[in-house]
Amino acid sequence: MPGGYVKWLEMVKKFYSTLANDTSLSDKLVRLRIIQDDISAANTLISEVEHSRSEYMREKGESQDSTTAKNAAFEKLDDWMSEFIAVSRIALEDNPQLMESLGVMVKS
């Protein structure tokens, strides 16, 4: 059995499509209680798995894009806050304890 997901899925897909197309093989599986309906159901499930996997990969890509955008926004905000705090230090030189109201710890 292949270790990779894609190779494994292709092997399973080939197995069930071969069974669906070759009646001599599927007739031999009847004694194992694997009937044509089971083979058809497996092919349907494989299609659902492929669709779910493609949805997962699409959503994973969207999540990565969102994370990139979020990190860029935080970086921009961090730059702005650094400048804001620097200006606040100058503005509040006479009363440095007010810096704590901005979330900046000041030595007493």
Image (cartoon, helix red, strand yellow):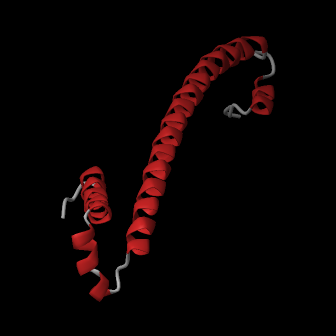
- Could you tell me residue 18's position as x and y percent? 25, 60
Residue at the image position 51 percent from the left and 45 percent from the top: 55
Residue at the image position 27 percent from the left and 69 percent from the top: 23
- Could you tell me residue 83's position as x and y percent? 65, 13
Report the side of 46 relative to 10 (left or right). right
Residue at the image position 48 percent from the left and 36 percent from the top: 61
Residue 91 occupies which quadrant of the picture? top right
In front of the other: 83 or 93: 83
- Could you tell me residue 96's position as x and y percent? 76, 24
- Could you tell me residue 20's position as x and y percent? 32, 63
- Position of 102 relative to 24 (above/below): above
Label tally? 0
Residue 26 occupies which quadrant of the picture? bottom left
Report the side of 57 relative to 32 (left or right). right
In front of the other: 6 or 32: 32
Quarter of the C terminus within the rendering: top right
In front of the other: 79 or 46: 46
Residue at the image position 22 percent from the left and 72 percent from the top: 25
- Position of 99 relative to 93 (above/below): below
Quarter of the N terminus within the rendering: bottom left
- Position of 58 relative to 28 (above/below): above
Residue 107 occupies which quadrant of the picture? top right
- Position of 93 relative to 60 (above/below): above
